[in-house]
Image (cartoon, rainbow, N blue to C red):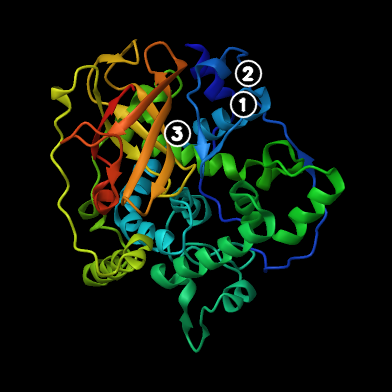
Amino acid sequence: MNLFTSFALATGLIVFCTFPRMHPLDAPTSQSVFTNSVDVTYDPGLTRMLPPVYFCGESVPLHEEAVARQLVSALLRNTAHNQALLRIRQRSAVFFPVIEPILAYHDIPLDFKYLPLVESALTGSAVSSAGAVGYWQFMPATARELGLNIRNGVDERRNLIKSTHAACRYLRYLHNRLGSWTLAAAAYNNGIGALLGNIRRQQQRDYYFLRLNAETGKYLYRILAFKELFSNSRSYQHLIPEQMMAFLQVPVSPDDERDVDEVILPEVVVEEATRKAINTSVIAKARPNQAEELPLPNAADVFRGGIKARLVESAGVARGQVWVFHLTRSGMADGREVEEGDVLYAVVEDVDPKTDKIYLRADKIYSTSEKHTYSLTLSAVDASTGRIGIKTPDIEQIKAGWILTWKAF
């Protein structure tokens, strides 16, 4: 039995889907039992073996032992039940294509698509003991304040599209009040009144160093665990059991969810909602009359010193956001030997409306074989010209599986 197997057994693994209570917009401060503890045995070298992790472009301070321990604990709890996690991935394949364009429309980072996985396991019929309902787990008062109809047998908290728009309005409100997406996520769970009370008493505005009640203290880590498992599981092969790794690698599609014993959304409704959301995206609103362009073919092989990487996760088209790529082959990058499967972390350096280009700079690469993070400088280039920058009309094509060319300059 290796260290990580012992570690997993020591955590007392539990089912990961619970339904926390949703508070009204100005929930009163409540008494909390503060805790930062995780009942696990910790390997001091683990922080060096974890890849960089970001939430909405904000770096997670994994160099702090307590932070690394919390993330590892969340990862292990989420991998405790193979079939349950596979079912969540199948639901995600159905719902993410609907949720993502709505988040983009409201300028909410795409990392928040993982929040309803924690709230409801993406189940519209989910009801918490406190009375929170639906995919985003709204309490009745909060739902009404956000414009959802709850009367005469109608409960729009169970409507994926309407409740997602409401959740975006709420998240925007929280971010405007708190100035941080991590704090916005915490307030979503605990209520903004309770969170502001903790901030005032402790004189601390960093989620990772606030002393919060047990549920809220673990809340963001649970979101991060889903993000990492669904988008970057290969970086955790030393931590995740082989059987779970196999479940995480199983291809899923919307068709996998056809036999569920509940009606999620009729296919025609999903397609129509997705079409409308995409047609009113932020980029489309900015250039409503601009003709669409076909994505250019990738010709990375013609560039000496260039490498190719496949997009796994994008946090949104905004400066400072972090996109995650996996290398598609071994080679050399900025004078360093890299291997297929290594993880490239790219920052959106600029979005230039004058040239209609987005500029991506990779500043970190995580070696999956060495379990170590290296600094490097690469830029995404137009595969047809070798020049820095990707045309923004092509952004609709940049999604999971899209391959970009990278070079050092």
How many angstroms separate mark 3 from mark 2 (CA)? 18 Å
Residue matched to label 2: 42
Residue positioned 38% across, 49% down in the render: 352
The C terminus lies in which quarter of the figure? Answer: top left
Residue at 18% in and 22% down? 303
Question: In the drawing, what numbered circle is on residue 79?
Answer: 3
Lower sequence index among marks 1 and 3: 1
> Which one is in front in this view, the residue at disc 3 or the one at disc 2?
2
Find out whether the residues at labels 1 and 2 contact each other: C-beta distance under 8 Å. Answer: yes
Give the mark nearest the N terminus, 3 or 2: 2
Q: Amino acid at mark 1?
A: Arg
Q: Give the residue type at disc 3.
A: Thr
Residue sitting farthest toward the bottom:
152
Measured in 3D between alpha carbons, the distance from the residue under mark 1 to the one under mark 3, in whole angstroms, is: 16 Å
Give the class, few, some or many, for how many residues have Cα within 10 Å of label 1's Cα (few <14, many ≥20).
Answer: many
Is residue 244 visible to the viewer in this orientation of the structure? yes
Horizontal side of 213 relative to 309 (left or right) equals right
Which residue lies at the image location 37% right of the left edge and 37% below the top edge?
360
Residue under the point 74% across and 53% down: 195
Q: Is residue 52 above or below residue 395?
A: above
In the image: residue 62, left or right of residue 239: right
Residue 69: numbered disc: 1
